[in-house]
């Protein structure tokens, strides 16, 4: 990351990641209880707390808005020009990370120099390697209970859950970063130590699922049906507004 930022002429502050042992024991006991129907893995929760730590640094340093990058992002050479063009654009959180799947996305609200579009989106997008967030947004959401109960990308990008559903969420088209782990392995860039996701590597057993397999399977199915129904209705409601499903390409050069 430091090599990439230096090559692009960007200056960043490194924020050391939060580890599970840094999280208060009572928080881990509440959110990482494997005897509950749903729980957060400790490494996954630490990722959320790492973002919150970065947000606090943004507020402490007095920035009105700032870029947040994770440590496994491949950055586009066009990123600096994109960031320079954001002056005056209104948003709460602006995602500029390429998605691994198609995005349910609306027509652009702003067109920046070079034809870059900023587009509202309705998909819940996984990955939080590159986004811009405003200080006002951080103040609104940093202490929200769902920023902890939900994965960080769901808390930022979901169309139905609080607090994200109330945020003005935009996506750059094209995207200006991509997670290394989502790329095909090729030499030093790919599914190596940089791109490896260790949030699911703890070997934890979901005790509730083991002890109540039928109840767990039924609850999971019902949640899937409910979520699918919400998505279908949301899709139909936004079709007249120009909703489409598209891949947002990565601006490599």
Image (tube, rainbow, N blue to C red):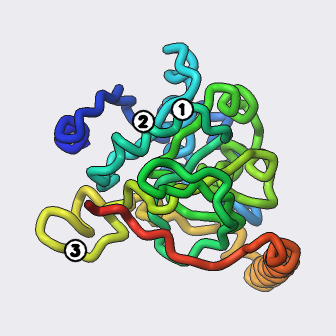
Q: Which mark is residue 108?
A: none
State the separation of the CA atoms marked 3 and 2.
32 Å
Q: Residues within 10 Å of mark 1 (few under 14, many from 20)?
A: few
State the separation of the CA atoms marked 1 and 3.
36 Å
Q: In which quadrant of the rendered image does the C terminus lie?
A: bottom left
Residue annotated with mark 2? 84
Note whether 53 is above or below 47 in the view shown: above
The reply to whether callout 1 and callout 3 are in contact (CB within 8 Å) is no
Q: In which quadrant of the rendered image does the N terminus lie?
A: top left
Q: Residue at x 66, y 41 (%)?
A: 91
Q: Residues within 10 Å of mark 2 (few under 14, many from 20)?
A: few
Q: Residue at x 55, y 57 (%)?
A: 117
Position in image of residue 177 (x %, y %): 38, 55
Q: Nearer the viewer, residue 139 or 66?
A: 66
Position in image of residue 52 (x %, y %): 57, 34
State the separation of the CA atoms marked 2 and 1.
7 Å
Residue annotated with mark 3? 185
Q: Nearer the viewer, residue 212 or 103?
A: 103
Relative side of 242 to 73, left or right = right
Mark 3 or mark 2: whose residue is earlier in sequence:
2
Residue 237 in view, yes or no? yes
User: Quarter of the image holding residue 158?
Assistant: bottom right
Viewer-nearest of discs 1 and 3: 1
The reply to whether callout 3 and callout 2 are in contact (CB within 8 Å) is no
The reply to whether callout 2 and callout 1 are in contact (CB within 8 Å) is yes
Q: Which mark is residue 87?
A: 1
Note whether 29 is above or below 228 in the view shown: above
């Amino acid at each position: 990351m430091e090599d990439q930022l230096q090559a692009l002429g960007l200056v960043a502050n490194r924020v050391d990641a939060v580890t599970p042992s840094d999280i208060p024991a009572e928080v881990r006991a509440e959110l990482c209880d494997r005897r509950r129907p749903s729980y957060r893995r400790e490494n996954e929760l630490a990722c959320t707390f790492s973002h919150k730590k970065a947000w606090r640094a943004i507020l402490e340093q007095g920035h009105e808005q700032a870029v947040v990058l994770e440590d496994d992002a491949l950055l586009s050479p066009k990123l600096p020009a994109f960031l320079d063009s954001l002056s005056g654009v209104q948003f709460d959180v602006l995602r500029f990370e390429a998605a691994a799947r198609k995005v349910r996305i609306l027509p652009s609200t702003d067109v920046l120099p070079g034809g870059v579009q900023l587009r509202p989106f309705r998909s819940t997008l996984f990955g939080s390697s590159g986004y811009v967030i405003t200080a006002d947004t951080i103040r609104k959401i940093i202490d929200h209970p769902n920023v902890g109960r939900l994965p960080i990308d769901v808390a930022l990008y979901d169309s139905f859950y609080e607090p994200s559903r109330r945020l003005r969420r935009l996506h750059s088209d094209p995207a200006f970063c991509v997670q290394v782990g989502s790329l095909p392995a090729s030499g030093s860039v790919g599914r190596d130590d940089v791109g490896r996701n260790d949030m699911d590597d703890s070997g934890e057993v979901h005790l509730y699922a083991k002890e109540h397999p039928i109840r767990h399977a039924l609850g999971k199915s019902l949640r899937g049906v409910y979520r699918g129904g919400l998505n279908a209705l949301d899709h139909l409601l936004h079709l007249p507004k120009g909703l489409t499903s598209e891949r947002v390409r990565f601006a490599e050069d």
